[in-house]
Amino acid sequence: MDGTVRDKLASFVAERDWERFHTPENLAKSIAIESGELLECFQWGDAADDARVRDELADVLTYCMLLADRLGVDPNQLILDKLAKTREKYPVEKARGRSTKYDAL
Amino acid sequence: MDGTVRDKLASFVAERDWERFHTPENLAKSIAIESGELLECFQWGDAADDARVRDELADVLTYCMLLADRLGVDPNQLILDKLAKTREKYPVEKARGRSTKYDAL
Amino acid sequence: MDGTVRDKLASFVAERDWERFHTPENLAKSIAIESGELLECFQWGDAADDARVRDELADVLTYCMLLADRLGVDPNQLILDKLAKTREKYPVEKARGRSTKYDAL
Amino acid sequence: MDGTVRDKLASFVAERDWERFHTPENLAKSIAIESGELLECFQWGDAADDARVRDELADVLTYCMLLADRLGVDPNQLILDKLAKTREKYPVEKARGRSTKYDAL
């Protein structure tokens, strides 16, 4: 997330006095709720409406950004830190072309 | 997401030949699965372990970024476009200090 | 759920003094968490391990039963009441062979 | 689930020729989607509307019953089998009054 997005989201929330609702727990629930709506685009198969998928993905992302901000972490750094760990769990030579979970590789 | 994060994720996936698994549907399922793990941090209350929350949020974000990339959309722009719509649904004067859903405001 | 199942679940919870954790909100979170684990069986496709699917489905069902009990409702009656409403929203002649949502039928 | 509920759900589905949509994978997605709607009742706190909670719980339960039926398992037996395993993971003397996960007890 770049700083502009972060600032615009923060203003949006502050103007509505919504910080009080945005506890980490409520944001985690919100992410799960919106993920369910995103999944609904694919409930009966893979032929989803693109505009709707984008809309629901935007909602998941928005709550993720709000939670990152609340935790005081940078979302980009969070992703990169986790990627470093995942690289170790899934070495190229073992994981190539396989969807097997790391503990069964 | 800045370009560096996008590129690093894309390399990680390409090196493992995992694009084949990353259909929009599978990514939407993955986002929902990881959201459940994030929510598990708060299963019995709001006293979550911060390191674990960051770790699970990173997983949700990673799959969101992969889906955005797959759809060919910029995650920052996606958030900003949605924010513009949400501003209209939740005018400050009506929504201030209330968690009521827009259709009941 | 038959009465035996209900009673055995209630004893299990009471023996551990866990009623205090089983607020409707915590049970709703638990259902979402376990649903994510069930979905994980199908993360990369439809070839799931049957024993694992049964195990995760059992977890979702268990929390559903606990929530029904907490709300003082009979799960069988709940399903039948909802089925009556769904029958009206999806008349056979309109819904036959189609997965379209009722508001788009 | 008693036999009546099972039979009524099966007729409802058969009349609409919906068996084709009810693959285990699609039912698992449906359970996750409906769990998200149930969780939405508690998005901003524990003061949920009871009628709505019952309605959403009914949807989760319905898809659970359809999946159990599809797998050819009895939901009551599924719950009891899992309860036996959970009893072993959470002995009364260790788990009493604690929400700690079994692997940290």
Image: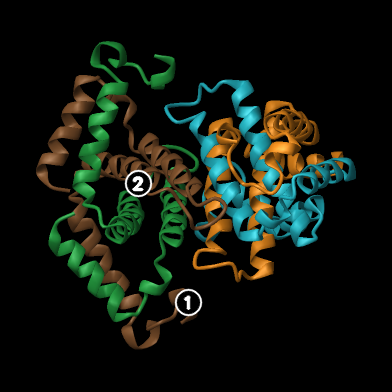
Chain colours: A brown, B green, C orange, D cyan
Q: Image quarter for residue A95? A: bottom left
**Disc 1 secondary structure class:** loop
- For residue D62, the mark is none
Figure check: A85 above or below D17: below
Q: Which residue is mark 1?
A: A100
User: Please, which residue is most extreme toward the bottom here?
Assistant: A93
Where does the C terminus of chain B fall, quadrant-wise? top left
Residue at figure coordinates x 35%, y 79% from the top left:
B17
Crowding around mark 1 (Cα neighbors within 10 Å: few <14, some 14 to 19, many 20+) is: few
User: Please, which residue is most extreme toward the front here?
Assistant: C93
Q: Tell me if A77 is positioned left or right of B89 in this view.
A: left
- For residue A57, the mark is 2
Tell me which label, 1 or 2, sits earlier in the chain.
2
Q: Kindly identify the amino acid type of the residue bearing the numbered disc 2.
A: Leu
Q: Tell me if B71 is positioned left or right of A45 in this view.
A: left
Chain letter for mark 1: A
| Marks 1, 2: nearer the viewer | 2
Residue at figure coordinates x 65%, y 54% from the top left:
D21
Q: Position of residue A98 (x, y in %)?
A: 44, 80
**Disc 2 secondary structure class:** helix
Q: Image quarter for residue B71? A: bottom left
Chain letter for mark 2: A
Where does the N terminus of chain B fall, quadrant-wise? bottom left
Q: Kindly identify the amino acid type of the residue bearing the numbered disc 1.
A: Thr
User: Please, which residue is most extreme toward the top here?
Assistant: B93
Figure check: A83 above or below C82: below
| Residue C13 appears in view | no
Q: How many marks?
A: 2
Q: Position of residue C103 (x, y in %)?
A: 56, 32
